[in-house]
Amino acid sequence: MTILAEGSVVRSARELIALVKKAEVGKSVLLEDLLEKIDCLAVLGDPRGVEITSVVWHHEQVTQGALYCCLPGQHFDGHDFAAKAIAKGAVALLCEHSVFPATATQSVHIYKKEDIGESIDPDVRSYVGENQEDVSAKDQGNSATDSIVQVVVEKGKTRVAMAQAACTFFGNPATDLLMVGVTGTNGKTTTTFILKSIFESAGIPTGVIGTLDGARTTPEAPELQKVLSAYKEAGYKACVMEVTSHALAQDRVYGICFDMAIFTNLSQDHLDYHGSMDEYFKAKAKLFTTNMAKVGIVNIDNAYGRRLMERSEIKVIPYGLKDVDQLDIGPNVTTFVFDNYRVRLSLGGLFNVENALAAATAAKAYGISAKDIVAGISQASGVPGRFEQVESDNGVRVVVDFAHTPDALDKVLQAARSALQDPSARLTVVFGCGGDRDKGKRPVMGQVASVFADRIVLTSDNPRSEDPQSIIDQILAGINSSAAVELHVEADRQKAIEFALRTSKPGDLVLIAGKGHESTQQIGNMTVPFDDRKVVSQFLDADADPFSEPIVWPSTAAMFAKRAQYDSIDQTLLYRDSEQTP
């Protein structure tokens, strides 16, 4: 597989995987150097001469010489796993409170006396004298932990400190790359892929980080900085990445000042985490502050985009459908005129025009010529699991899409409806809603489906800890009983897909929504293999699987997906938490 045709840029996914591994293997930084960049309250123990070989946040990621970051979480607290981290070789802890008492052989260095108070834990306060910078501890400790350095930070600031440590450990690679962050409820992935295509048409080798990469759409700071370091070593000059509201709220991208920040749209999602649309918007708006980005690219066709325009701290360039002329949207191809150039986009749906406009406006703001922008959009291929289509031998068309919000389902259903060529053809949608997520959107999605579909087959998505039938019942509550829609319920997702395909006729279209590119399903505490696209291809008994692991561009998706073939498995794949997609 070829990444780029010429130059010193790494060409294959295998080479890029090797560079990601190389970014950390054999690397070490003195803890004292990291401490210069970390906003810490106190250090228990002597950091002098301590070499850090990795910065990690999960105890199973620990190798000899690691700085283990004790992250408090919704279900688990990283401080509780510190002993396991030390047993695996961690030499220092980044924590919100001391895990082990300071010993007689250790010193306590206070970095910010003005912060000594309730925010710092009692063990540390008890060792602080009125005018002392370093004081000896009074207690005798456990010899197994005597040499462990504990870096204590303010409560709620562990992720900030971890990001500071990771940036320093990997040498702040983002400063050597053109960084573009894309945020919004929908459209992030497609926008990043189109912008990558435009940049590379203009001769700018570009990496992508996002939803297709495995564990999290926006990785935790250590993984993010490691990948950015690998991109830099690989010869890339730019990185286009998805920046989720979770990542912004949790400071995963702290320490990066994006050259451009793109806002695609905002609609209901993740209210289980943010609590309200206002808080959800505030999390997104954080990207458009002076310490996070230099220039903003904002969709003013979205009400929240217009709101962002009014309160953004940085220069903002608006975009919208008013920027195009002669728009012609087909099932698979869309054409329009942008900046006096005719553009051919190999994607259907009005929402993909918006995604292309986001990418084009950002590229134009960077100074890329209209000719290169048009070429890049024209060369952009479909994104795995985003309105991904196949037509069966019997004439039934199938679309697999990631739509898992009311707004996304609305738009993809309208696009699917417009793709029907026979007035008598039926549109069937197969979907469910994820468990342990925003429950408020479930009836809304049911309502949307009942407006635009002829048949609805309700099923499971990723039920996680919830009862699948309970989730389905909540979706059913929103379906318009007076709508002329045929309704079926089948909690088994494979059976639901097969039923929809088996009962469709030539010319009909079956939209399978919610999971898109995902290759697993989360049921209870298990993660089992499941791919909508493979279920379709196996049922159709196609000679060639049209969904056989399509790799449109070698983003980090390719790296992580193939990493298991090599001598170590990346822990970001093994420890997927409840916030997989954000």
Image (cartoon, helix red, strand yellow):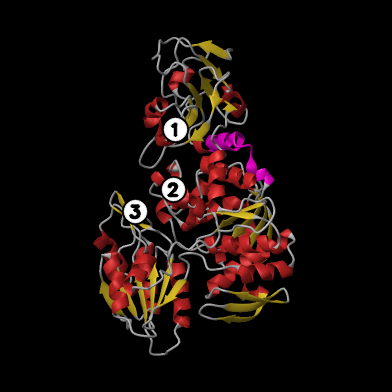
Q: Position of residue 569 (x, y in %)?
A: 43, 43
Q: Identify the image quadrant of residue 417.
A: bottom left
Q: CA distance from mark 2 to mark 3?
A: 32 Å
For label 2, the residue is 565
Residue at horizontal 39 percent and vertical 85 percent from the top: 507
In the picture of the structure, the residue carrying the numbered disc 1 is: 62
For the magenta stretch, what is the residue range? 160-176
**In terms of secondary structure, where does tag 2 sit?**
helix
Label number found at residue 282 = none
Q: CA distance from mark 1 to mark 3?
A: 29 Å
> Residue 434's image quarter?
bottom left
Q: Earlier in the sequence, mark 1 or mark 2?
A: 1
Q: Is residue 405 magenta?
A: no
Quadrant the N terminus occupies: bottom right
Any part of residue 381 in sight: yes
Q: Circle 1: is it few (<14), some (14-19), or many (20+) Cα within 10 Å?
A: many
